């Protein structure tokens, strides 16, 4: 007789501040709910457990849209560490590292950006709302689960990072200069042995920041920028394709729809042209679990866009050719 | 992490989850049965057991007080009484896993031993209910529902506590018709969603170290039986 164990929570990662890319939260074991790659699921870390997390999001831009040089690709790396303070309360710290690469003749940037801190509270509905208990059966895990998360970034990166020509491009800065704030809600329901539906709504709000004088970039007195608010509505279906209890291996397929609304950036009090808009991404991916480790792989593409001054936008969200996403996490 | 050990206990226990104990009732007669009757496993439906392995045959009223009941000595073992709860415990003795198969002997009586254990199996049947039955009635591994389980409907959760030596027992693996559904928390609780109509069988398993020299550990299994209307 093959008996599968209770889920060992394998991966959890909450939203983190990356200017145009967020992580999410999820957890799964051989049995129990699955976790999408992009959409946050509603799981918290087991009490007293640590989580190590690495994500890379390679966003290849469409080119030949505007006069060269254009943005070629952005690569968002994120290193994270989480801890379960209580079964229902997890805390995380994330350190992003961004690479923004132009086509030949352009100006590139790369480096560590703002550190971020996140907190996640988990609760569920089982004949009433309650905080997530320390231990749940497989049947308990099929109840509706929720999380509320919130966090802030710390201005540890260099917002006034100068490019090779000594100019400052806020879009290629290594920080926002001031803290940004994020919050959101998730809901997860495993509705059969293999299938899990996940929903998420979240926002990231940025503060106004005045950059250093930049005569080369045409802002000798500096430029004040407030990046537009990011609003996300995500939904996902995770389906367990394969489980091998004897080797503690599991393979899930994931399909996601991610709606993103970017507010228009404001520069010196004026709405910036060719920024912001709305878009829907389709995400197809897989997640593999082995023992206490998990690897997620996904392809993400914009499938619908309504961008402000769309024909002038290049290298931004909604104008990607594709995004390749890989995540690795381990619980210890 | 203790979960792999629990898994091992499930796999090794000759009665736990692989075969079932259940109690058939006909009027005041409670008959201890053993086999595959209730789980839908492949193989013979009923298996014979040695009546002398039955260590306990007990009858309780609705307040949890033990009643005097007549016990048969032949196979199948029977208990006669007006029981709100009937209870049997048996022990199939010592078991040793060797490279040549698993033998029903202590490790001292076989050669090379990979693992060895002493096995205890119990079954509890609930026919009537009061809140006084929400606690342990014995000192053995035992499952007790928090409320009247017979009032539940298919799709609802059975809220249970596992007890051992009369106290809530943590890390007890609990299965529903042979499929592991959870492990008890520090307060002994676990919730199981009932998905089958009719007779219900919930099985618990607990592994404990043993230092009598005859085996490495004891494997306790205990089933709870009741019927949905």
Image (cartoon, coloured by chain):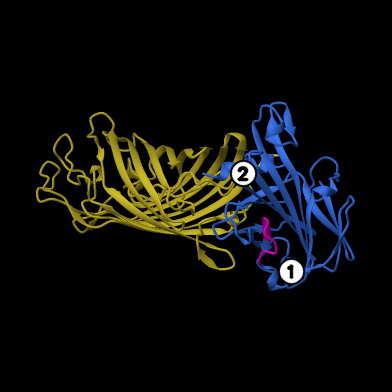
Residue B97: percent from left, percent from top: 69, 33
| Dot 1 alpha-carbon crowd within 10 angstroms: few under 14, some 14 to 19, many 20 or more | few
Residue at 86%, 66% in the rendered image = B81
- Answer with left or right where residue A241 lies relative to residue A304: right
The one nearer the camera, B55 or A311, is B55
- Answer with left or right where residue A299 lies relative to residue B158: left
Of discs 2 and 1, which sits in the foreground?
2
- Answer with left or right where residue A49 lies relative to residue B43: left
Residue labelled with disc 1: B151
Counting residues from the N terminus, which is met first, the one under dot 2 or under dot 1? 1
Q: Chain B shown in which color?
A: blue
Asked if marks 2 and 1 touch (Cβ < 8 Å), the reply is no
Q: Is residue B174 magenta?
A: no
The residue segment tinted magenta is B135-143
Residue labelled with disc 2: B210
Residue A253: percent from left, percent from top: 56, 40
Relative to A246, residue A204 above or below: below
Task: Answer yes or no: is residue A4 visible.
Answer: no
Residue at 83%, 48% in the rendered image = B52
Quadrant containing the N terminus of chain A in the rendered view: top right
Quadrant of residue A224 within the rendered picture: bottom left
Relative to A117, residue A112 above or below: above
Residue at 22%, 54% in the rendered image = A178
Residue B12: percent from left, percent from top: 68, 39
Quadrant of residue B2 within the rendered picture: top right
The one nearer the camera, B15 or A258, is B15
Alpha carbon distance from label 2 to label 1: 39 Å
Chain under disc 1: B
The one nearer the camera, B111 or B88, is B111
As helix, strand or loop, the secondary structure at mark 2 comes to loop
């Amino acid at each position: 007789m093959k008996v599968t164990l209770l889920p060992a929570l394998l991966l959890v990662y909450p939203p983190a501040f990356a200017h145009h890319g967020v992580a999410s939260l999820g957890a799964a074991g051989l049995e129990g709910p699955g976790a999408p790659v992009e959409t946050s699921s509603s799981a918290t870390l087991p009490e007293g457990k640590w989580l190590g997390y690495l994500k890379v999001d390679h966003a290849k831009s469409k080119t030949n849209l505007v006069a060269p040089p254009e943005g070629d690709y952005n690569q968002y790396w994120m290193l994270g560490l989480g801890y379960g303070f209580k079964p229902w309360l997890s805390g995380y710290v994330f350190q992003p590292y961004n690479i923004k690469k132009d086509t030949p003749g352009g100006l590139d940037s790369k480096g560590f950006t703002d550190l971020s801190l996140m907190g996640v509270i988990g609760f569920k509905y089982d004949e009433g709302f309650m905080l997530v208990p320390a231990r749940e059966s497989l049947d308990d895990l099929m109840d509706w689960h929720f999380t509320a998360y919130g966090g802030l970034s710390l201005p540890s990166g260099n917002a006034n990072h100068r490019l090779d020509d000594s100019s400052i491009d806020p879009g290629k800065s290594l920080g926002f200069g001031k803290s940004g704030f994020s919050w959101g809600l998730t809901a997860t329901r495993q509705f059969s042995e293999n299938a899990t539906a996940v929903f998420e709504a979240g926002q990231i709000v940025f503060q106004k920041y005045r950059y250093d004088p930049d005569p080369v970039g045409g802002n000798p007195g500096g430029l004040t920028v407030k990046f537009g608010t990011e609003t996300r509505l995500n939904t996902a279906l995770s389906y367990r394709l394969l489980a091998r209890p004897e080797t503690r291996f599991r393979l899930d397929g994931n399909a996601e729809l991610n709606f993103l609304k970017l507010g228009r950036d404001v520069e010196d009090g004026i709405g910036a042209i060719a920024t912001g808009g709305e878009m829907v991404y389709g995400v197809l991916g897989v997640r593999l679990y082995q023992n206490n480790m998990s690897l997620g792989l996904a392809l993400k593409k914009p499938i619908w866009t309504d961008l402000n001054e769309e024909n002038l936008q290049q290298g931004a969200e909604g104008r990607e050719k594709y995004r390749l996403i890989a995540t690795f996490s381990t619980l210890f | 992490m203790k979960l792999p050990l629990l898994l091992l206990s499930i796999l090794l226990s000759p009665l736990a989850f692989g075969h079932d104990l259940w109690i058939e009732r006909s009027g005041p007669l409670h008959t201890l049965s053993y086999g595959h009757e209730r789980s839908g496993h492949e193989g013979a439906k009923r298996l014979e057991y040695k009546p002398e392995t039955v260590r306990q045959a007990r009858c309780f009223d609705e307040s949890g007080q033990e009643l005097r009941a007549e016990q048969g000595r032949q196979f199948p073992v029977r208990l006669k009484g007006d029981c709100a709860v009937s209870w049997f415990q048996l022990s199939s003795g010592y078991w040793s896993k060797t490279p040549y198969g698993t033998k029903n002997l202590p490790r001292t009586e076989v050669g090379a031993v990979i693992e060895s254990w002493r096995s205890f199996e119990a079954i509890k049947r609930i026919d009537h209910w009061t809140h006084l039955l929400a606690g342990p009635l014995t000192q053995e591994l035992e499952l007790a529902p928090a409320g009247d389980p017979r009032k539940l409907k298919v799709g609802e959760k059975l809220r249970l506590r596992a007890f051992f030596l009369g106290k809530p027992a943590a890390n007890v693996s609990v299965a529903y018709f042979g499929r592991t559904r959870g492990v008890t928390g520090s307060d002994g609780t676990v919730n199981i969603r009932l998905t089958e109509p009719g007779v219900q069988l919930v099985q618990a398993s607990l592994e404990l170290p043993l230092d009598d020299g005859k085996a490495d550990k004891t494997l306790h299994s205990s089933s709870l039986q009741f019927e949905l209307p």
